Image (cartoon, rainbow, N blue to C red):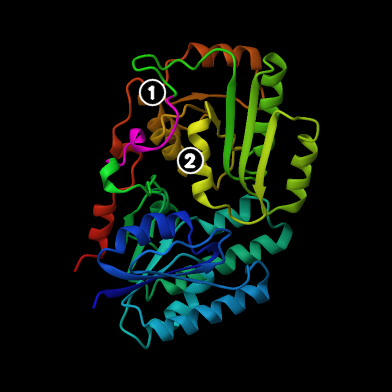
Amino acid sequence: MPRKVLIASLLKPVDDVRGFERFALSLAPDFEVFMVGAPSLSPLPKIPNIHFLPYDFFPRRFMQRLRASLIFYRQLRQIKPDVLIVQSPDLLPFAVFYSLFRNCRLIYDVRENYRLNILHQGYYRGLTKHVLAAAVRTVETVSSLRINRYWLAEQSYAAELPFVRHNYDFVPNKFAPLHPPSSKLKPDGFSKPVRFIKGNKLLPEGRLRLIYTGTVSRAYGTHLAIELAKKMHRVNHKISLLVIGSCSDATYRQELEKMIADCPFIEWQVSTQPLNHQLIIDALPHADLAVISYLPNRSTERCMPTKIYEYMAFRLPFLMPANPLWESVAHPYNAALVVDFQRVDAEILLQRIRQTSFYSPEPPDDVWQFNREQFRALLAG
């Protein structure tokens, strides 16, 4: 009988990209994997050795979070996993308590620096954010007494999180294609229209399809991407923008919807809950240029956006603000142009885009691709 692995999150859906596409699909050949998390907006796939256990509600508020945590603890006692991978600080107290009475390997998958997020991303204000930030850091620090290993989504967390010490593995959010191995996991294995003529990677004249993907928020500068599309559209009426992702901030969402109310060239596919990741991936082959318009923020400046790896997998050029970490990955392959989104001249930018030969040279697979074999080795033995 294969050993049991339980992967648990609180706010992320059970088919979330990191938990399901990277972790569960990599572990399923050797383990029986149980996914605990928020409900998904999409039908859940049937995959051997992977079991989805979604809550029947989305735990946004405090009492809902507590209820979800209690459900998680009950599932722990029923499943009795050999390996427990926790992806939310809210679940750590219940995981630690369970580990006191059962011999299981407890891994804290640190997806974000939650303390910095609370302090700097604008979701909380005043005294509230400082109390929450201190509470999260206290839970993480106390839990470190029982945690066997940390998995860090960002290399910078090793220096930012004192409780991690040297007890960690770096597990980056690189792109993990869902296609079978026969496709060799290369961009040419995807069903997509041919964008580039071999040896000529200049974007075509005329029509230019922009895309903004992922989380829609003020900290991520979605409004700057919309403003940029408007400026570029005034220069060239064949320019369009697709915004596809999710937005949990109702006020900001309404603000953006007003911005695009008179812009038929901007397509809006934004959900209030996390969108199925495959919908975003399916949209990438139809775009010509992606936009990453993050505002300067202490919580994101040392983090690598997952979308960079996705764009590079599809050889999709992108615009981004200046950031030494991001540039170290993108610039060796001419994958992106650095833009000051708050002081952009659309006409000059369009000239730069037309004159740039993107993806020369092309990035090797290990730059953008999640290494499933290397990941499985973390739980070997």
Q: Position of residue 87 (x, y in %)?
A: 46, 64
Residue 5 seen in the current view: yes
Asked which quadrant contains residue 359, the reply is: top left
In the foreground, 39 or 223: 39
Secondary structure state at the residue bearing disc 1? loop
User: How far is the residue under mark 1 from the one under mark 2?
Assistant: 16 Å
Relative to residue 155, is residue 345 drawn left or right? right
Relative to residue 92, is residue 186 drawn left or right? left
Q: Position of residue 277 (x, y in %)?
A: 51, 50
Please tell me how crowded label 2 is: few (under 14), some (14-19), or many (20+) other residues with Cα within 10 Å.
many
Q: Could you tell which of marks 1 and 2 lies nearer the N-terminus?
A: 2
In the foreground, 288 or 123: 288
The magenta segment: 184-194
* Identity, as a three-letter code, of the amino acid under mark 1: Tyr
Please tell me how crowded label 1 is: few (under 14), some (14-19), or many (20+) other residues with Cα within 10 Å.
many
Q: The C terminus is located in which quarter? A: bottom left
Residue placed under numbered mark 1 in the picture: 359
Relative to residue 261, is residue 118 drawn left or right? left
From the viewer's perspective, is residue 5 above or below residue 325? below
Q: Residue furthest left?
A: 381
Q: Position of residue 347 (x, y in %)?
A: 64, 12
Residue placed under numbered mark 2 in the picture: 307
